[in-house]
Amino acid sequence: MRATVMFGAGDVRIENVPDARIIEPTDAVVTVTRACICGSDLWPYKTMEHSDTGRVMGHEAIGVVEAIGPDVRTIKPGNLVVIPFAFSDGTCVFCREGLQTSCIHGGFFGTTEVAGAQAEAVRVPQADGTLFVLPVEKDDALMPSLLTLSDVMGTGHHAAVIAKVGPGKSVAVVGDGAVGLCGVIAARRLRAEQIIILGRHPARIELAKQFGATDVVSERGDEAIERVRELTDGFGVHSVLECVGLEQAMHTAISIARPGGAVGRVGLPQEEVIPGSEPAFYNNVTVGGGPAPVRAYIDELLPDVLEGRIHPGRVFDRTIELDEVPNGYRAMNERKAIKVMVEP
């Protein structure tokens, strides 16, 4: 089968790789009908050291179940399923607590251990606990929005939940990528009163406004902090969604949170140390977050997608075939696309 293989920074190719197959009795094999490129894929695209074997990329997909292992009970061949970016058994102590990204038998797609989904097919470990059966046909017009439930919509929602977004609160979203834009959707869905988007790309800012952003801050660093404070009577916001992962973004997030506020961090961290420890301490700012347990959020978010109350699929501004994936990486890396959808 064909798949996207990254061999090093800037070196993405479409290669023939061994077919996805059942290895463990709890596995399923899914033929991929939709996949996409994630902003987090751009970090190895910029920094990955050369590998002779490469790594099959991709952790967001929708597809049709083609085969199941003998121990799979709830998933059937022919099911149309969304594949969350982390696989999980659904039964361990952490899965029962809604934290599937910490499943003791789980892991992540697109690693050196488990091949990714920017491919014609993918092996899904722990199929019963991982896959979510969709009540639509594979060519449904809602497919782009349904695909976001595999990562970015659930991740934006996770940031909002951790940041304690709620009715009447003020919210700032740091980052205007797909996750940040979905964070705007999540904040509006949770009835925030003021939603400030921190970003500077016109097309993304316009989309953020359509999603519910009430204010825009295009400055960076100290100027951005000052501008947010101006918009909030000098206090800062109740909730901050940090959707970038860089040091400056995290410093800004803590600096614009009001005393007693909260920061939900979902941007993949690029540094080992969290900046802003001292001001966070003295201002009683709660800082939390991590890989979003998107599997736990699908039940809650799916009805809003199906009934047209939210439209997160609008973050996809380019659709390509599998052979064009290297160009899709370049487009996202050069900020010529917000998020690229792949139709193998």
Image (cartoon, helix red, strand yellow):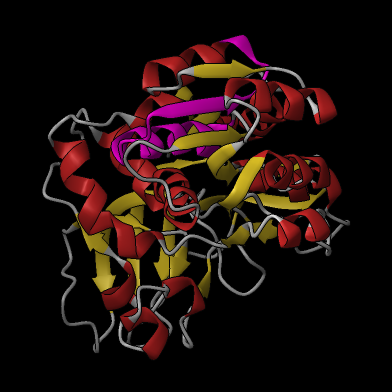
- Given residues 164 and 159, the one toward you in this image is 164
Please give left or right for residue 228 compared with residue 270 in the image: left
Residue 270 image offset from top left, x and y in percent: 79, 54
Please give left or right for residue 172 compared with residue 9 in the image: left
Quarter-of-image position of residue 309: top left
> Which span of residues is magenta-colored?
177-202
* Residue positioned 63% across, 43% down in the render: 257
Quadrant where the C terminus is found in the figure: top left
- Residue 280 visible in the picture: yes
* Residue positioned 79% across, 25% down in the render: 220
Where 15 falls versus 162 (above or below)? Answer: above
- Given residues 107 and 96, the one toward you in this image is 96
* Residue positioned 18% across, 52% down in the render: 134
* Residue positioned 17% across, 29% down in the render: 308
Residue 26 image offset from top left, x and y in percent: 33, 84
- Given residues 141 and 269, the one toward you in this image is 269
**Is 37 included in the stretch rendered in magenta?**
no
Please give left or right for residue 66 compared with residue 116 in the image: left
Where 228 falls versus 118 (above or below)? Answer: above
Quarter-of-image position of residue 123: bottom left
Please give left or right for residue 132 compared with residue 155 in the image: left
Residue 201 image offset from top left, x and y in percent: 65, 15
**Is 184 included in the stretch rendered in magenta?**
yes
